[in-house]
Image (spheres, rainbow, N blue to C red):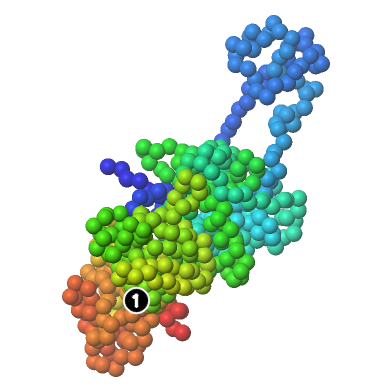
Amino acid sequence: MEKNTRKRGLKTKQTIDSQPNPNPITTTTTTPAADVETTTTRRVSKRRKNEKPSDVTTIKSPDRRSSRYKNDHSTNVGDYDDDDDDVAGNVGKAVPSMDAVVKVFCVHTEPNFSLPWQRKRQYSSSSSGFIISGRRVLTNAHSVEHYTQVKVKKRGSDTKYLATVLAIGTECDIAMLTVSDDEFWEGISPLEFGDLPALQDAVTVVGYPIGGDTISVTSGVVSRIEILSYVHGSTELLGLQIDAAINSGNSGGPAFNDKGKCVGIAFQSLKHEDAENIGYVIPTPVIMHFINDYEKNGEYTGFPILGVEWQKMENPDLRMSMGMGNEHKGVRLKRIDPTAPAFKVLSSSDIILSFDGVNVANDGTVPFRHGERIGFSYLVSQKYSGDKVFVKILRNSKIREFNIELATQTRLIPAHIEGKPPSYYIIGGLVFSAVSVPYLRSEYGKDYDFDAPVKLLDKHLHALAESVDEQLVVISQVLVADINIGYEEIVNTQVLAFNNKPVKNLKSLADMVESCSEEFLKFDLEYQQIVVLRTEMAKKATQNILLTHCIPSAMSDDLKS
């Protein structure tokens, strides 16, 4: 049975980047920079011999053949002649806001997570973007992920201008660019942002999708407004569902309302045999949060979280057992993230009654607009990292109130490494790596959430980091040599301890091994496995193994400091 998938059509090699999601959706929003030739023809009817130019009346499109035959006996004919304006001149004047829509060209060089000491072959892609105030350009984060060079081209121009990436917001899938060349900004008016649209409001998506080189316009209406799963960022934020077509290359293009104001950024779409024309747009509240965050801090700091997992309280018996009366509504906390500030004040089985003065319902929703409700995580996403919020809880049948600071999420298995090269450490042919979502995708493909080892997936989906610097360290592979005979089949197995000391992260493991003066190096692995090497022999063999595999160093640069 075919399943739903969310993907991003980014790469010439046709790989699809997707994140784990219980209801995956495809983002096909960036096109490979390949030449696509399309030939379009227009039938232009000729003026009859005896007809005078003054008798000619121009209409927007020629009639069907049967209609033209009928009109041969009438005085008004939909024909062009040499004395008329040329075809291009008869086309309606372009909406000025469309001139602010640009095409983004990017050259990407991805890290090779399976061989972390080198990078993959570079590739090119194209997407869309648009100009805003302050000489800035907005596009999608996945459009410039692992960028080496970014260029932008204005509508109707033949010049590509070098762009500088100012900020990349992985969670919200937005990136901000600028261009230093003054010529680029001449004659361009930045787009203005509109309010969050209502259901059934008309929207127009503009961009440079696959199928041609010129600008493309698709129209539709707002079908749904809710908390969506953002594929690129593995987060859940407010999003718009529209029925306008969003294709590969539309990524980063603006969505306009009927007043010509930008109400969102196209970023992903649903591809499934039972669905047609379902696209998703990043709405203005999320966009303005990204822009304000950058202007306030000089960099992108991210969307904060409360750091809790909760359970609905819709069952009457459950509510009664927790001491909730008819006047109480809220959700029960299952567990709290140890790295979140809320861990110091909240406890498991607390009932959140209200967040920042807004009452939370038993199903975890809060009032949104007239006739609409939305998950209370929307209230959290409107705050900034470091903000304090007023939270009212029910604990042991007593109401308590706290001011809790919000912070960005720390994940045991991060969704991104934020442009940094992956870390690695090699000793005796054993290659140690820190697990991340890009690492799992590199090892097991786009369906890593089905094909990766169950224990790794369990930690990815459910485990919480105990500290901000905790990592999940694995032996990713064994570079075969005489010293590691018998260990060749160890692949992607977690390292729990070294010489009976717990492994907190990759750097702590490297430091312990490098400073080890004991006779043996003993690694305790998952599944009750152990790996033992003689310390002196392992360190001597490492240099020969590095030479054999053309590896420049036994550890990544971030572990040397």
57 vs 433, left or right, is: right
* 164 up-or-down from 245: above or below: below
Q: Amino acid at mark 1?
A: Glu
Where residue 156 appears, as percent x and y from the top left, is 69, 44
Camera-nearest residue between 370 and 503: 370
Is any atom of residue 501 visible in this view? Answer: yes
Picture residue at 75% right of the left edge, 20% below the top:
81
450 vs 246, left or right, is: left
In which image quadrant can residue 290 be found? Answer: bottom right
Where residue 20 appears, as percent x and y from the top left, is 36, 57
* 83 up-or-down from 444: above or below: above
Picture residue at 82% right of the left edge, 16% below the top:
54
Picture residue at 36% right of the left edge, 37% below the top:
274
* 526 up-or-down from 159: above or below: below
Camera-nearest residue between 480 and 517: 517
- The residue at which mark 1 appears reads as 466
Is any atom of residue 446 visible in this view? Answer: no
